Amino acid sequence: MHIILELPQIKRKKHTRPSKCPYCKGAVFQRWGMVSRQIKDTKVRTVNVPRYKCTSCQRTFREYPQGVSPAQQSERLMKLCVIMWSLGLSHRSVALILSAFGLSLSHMSAWRDLQQAGGAIRQKLMWKPARVVGVDGAWMKGKGIMVAVDLGNGELLALAEVDEKEKGAVKTWLKVLKQKHKIGAIVTDDLATYKEIADELELGHQVCQFHVRRWVGIALKKLVKELPGEWLHVIPIIHEMINDLPVNGGKMLYELWKEMPGRTTEPEEKRTPLEKLRDIVLRLSRDWGRYIEFYSDPGIPWTNNRSEQIIGRLKSRAKRVRGYKTCQGMQMGSLVASQFWT
């Protein structure tokens, strides 16, 4: 993981005239004085701001140099506050560190810098197209959260306080995201609700191969000690198919399922090891198309690693970074931090 630290450059004066009036779009101006303005910055303390009068609408306006705005802080100082917060400092700590360099800044000003940066990123992503999106859920600080990640570039698209086991809430959330970002396919774990939602919203669906191989491996490992000897040969067949992922794997598994004896226990009774194996084969056969969706579209990854990484980073940062107490704080912090961490 690398940290990207790029700070805006600050100019003391602007050497070019404005091209148009910000009010009427006029193109002819009169110079209307020069203001020496004090700003808060790590290097520059004073900048020259020219003032102009539009000959069309007779209104005056200021033309600020690069990296300077009507705000008292420079763009460089604003971004520096956000970077320090992203590295784990509280807003009060940010203000304290800046005071050592002779900069007086309240912790609320540092907080507003973060809100402004996060709001700008969120506005930029609001209608951004994302053809393939990774969706995953987690449990953090006693509440369920869901993340949606653009798998084209790894950017976090959305974060919501939704329990992934609540199908209705997840479907409503995904439906809005599909409309806003023109989503065509999702990559998820093997939870049954995701399969139903993908079908109902008419989305392509790739199930993360890491999750499939993990649950299948655990299930078969338990059964290998309990199965009748004449059915042990099915275990390596399933392992081989999961590793190779043949296109006709669903049909092959279905034929294998038909060769196995039917269920002999009652629905309320505990299943035998052979019945458990039979159910695994049927489940894999039924969902095989979701395991190989990436064959039909090179833009679909076969795992959901990007989403897993963002959730892992969220959990890690929630333990040591201030502001992650609410879902909004998590989203704002994650959006901002994603601009500096790769």
Image: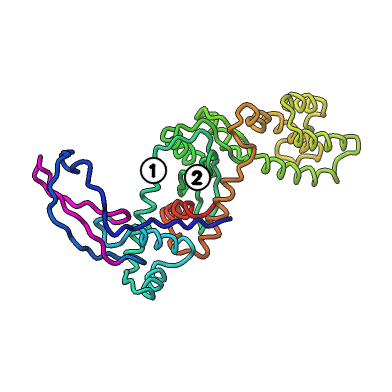
Question: Residue 185 at what x, y percent from top left?
Answer: 54, 32
Q: Nearer the viewer, residue 181 or 63?
A: 63
Classify 100 as above or below 49: below
Residue 183 left/right relative to 50: right
Number of disc labels: 2
Q: Nearer the viewer, residue 125 or 226?
A: 125
Classify 325 as above or below 268: below
Question: Residue 297 at what x, y percent from top left?
Answer: 60, 28
Q: Earlier in the sequence, mark 2 or mark 1?
A: 1
Residue 260 left/right relative to 116: right
Residue found at x 51% / y 29%: 200
Element under label 2?
strand
Residues tagged 2 and 1 counted as in contact (Cβ below 8 A): no
Classify 60 as above or below 80: above
Residue found at x 10% / y 42%: 55
Element under label 1?
helix
In which quadrant of the rendered image does the N terminus lie?
A: bottom right
Residue 61 left/right relative to 302: left
Question: Residue 141 at what x, y percent from top left?
Answer: 51, 59
Task: Kindly identify the amino acid type of the residue bearing the numbered disc 2.
Answer: Glu
Task: Kindly identify the amino acid type of the residue bearing the numbered disc 1.
Answer: Lys
Residue found at x 60% / y 42%: 304
Which residues fall within the magenta stretch? 45-68
Query: Local crowd at mark 2 within 10 Å, few (<14), some, or many (≥20)?
Result: many
Q: Is residue 153 magenta?
A: no
* Tag 1 residue: 124
| Mark drawn on residue 155 | 2
